[in-house]
Amino acid sequence: MKIFKGNLMRLARPPLPEQVKDDPIHVRIRDVHKSYADQHVLRGVSLDVHRGKTNLIIGPSGSGKTVLMRQLIRLEKPDSGALLVNGVDFAQLEGLELASMRRTFGMVFQMSALFDSMTVFDNVAFPLREHTDLSRKEIRERVMDKLAALGVAGAAHKLPAQLSGGMQKRVAVARAMILESEILIYDEPTTGLDPITTEMVDDLIVEAEQMFGVTSIVISHDMASVVRIADYLSFLHLGEIAASGTREELLHSEHPATAEFVRASRISID
């Protein structure tokens, strides 16, 4: 079913008001709570996501990172709190308004999450076929443009299993960007990758940000691999933001849990 048949045919977004476009904060998360039965997972999370920057949300396993991500893209609704995206409270939207706002976000999943039985081209074309009524020619042009921009146009007719881990990530970014998303969320993007591919993925995050002008949110526990590309960091601990700021500010945080996490990561803070 094409959710927005006709309405998204050109994938055109209304221009953002100048005061929104010039706002350095793209997303404001304010006092977000989320519980499941008697388990209180998010306990008043508040943080800013900086526009056009790489924003890293880090924390140990079980700290609530995945639950926070699910609230952020509204797979779930927070019990309370606000998710202000371009000044609009995403947490309060429903129906077509909610579905439209979701297009603001593109998702790059942990293991790329490409469809094994589809070619690279069909993987990237899938959102266009599902959510627009663009012609076959228009879809082909858009898909090939994205693949070419990310350096994987030559793999258009290959299956994901025929690609390296780094190339699969590039295809995943192309798919995440095909609906012209403003914000890319990376879920544990380097988990399970070797050091060389990990560095390639880190570079890809910066490359996509510069090429498409997107805001990047990287959710990870692997601080050592991505701290070199982060502009801003937030440390999630027991469902709360224990420390937040620039890379230098977080690396030198005096918050006990944050300092211990930095120490245990064995990265240089000089």
Image (cartoon, rainbow, N blue to C red):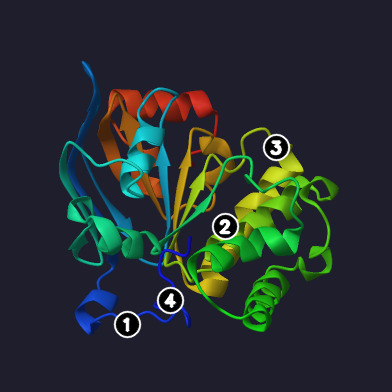
Checking the image for residue 8, the label placed there is: 4
Q: CA distance from mark 4 to mark 2?
A: 27 Å
Of mark 4 and mark 1, the one earlier in the sequence is: 4
- Residue for badge 1: 14
Mark 1 and mark 3 in contact (Cβ < 8 Å)? Answer: no
Q: Is residue 71 above or below residue 151?
A: above
What's the distance in space between the residues labelled 4 and 1, CA to CA?
A: 11 Å
How far separated are the C-alphas under marks 3 and 2? 15 Å
Query: Which x, y percent locates residue 134?
Result: 56, 79
Please indicate, yes or no, whether residue 199 appears anywhere in the rendered image: yes
Q: Nearer the viewer, mark 4 or mark 1?
A: 4
Examine the rendered structure and indicate whether residue 248 appears above or below residue 16: above
- Pick whichever of labels 4 and 3 is earlier in the sequence: 4
Q: Which residue is mark 3?
A: 193
Q: Residue at x 67, y 44 (%)?
A: 198
Please tell me the numbered disc located at residue 205.
Answer: 2
Disc nearest the viewer among 3 and 1? 1
Q: What is the spatial separation of the Cα atoms under label 3 and label 1, in whole angstroms?
A: 39 Å
Looking at the image, tell me whether mark 4 or mark 2 is earlier in sequence order: 4
Q: Is residue 127 left or right of residue 141?
A: left
What is the x, y in percent for residue 153?
A: 77, 70
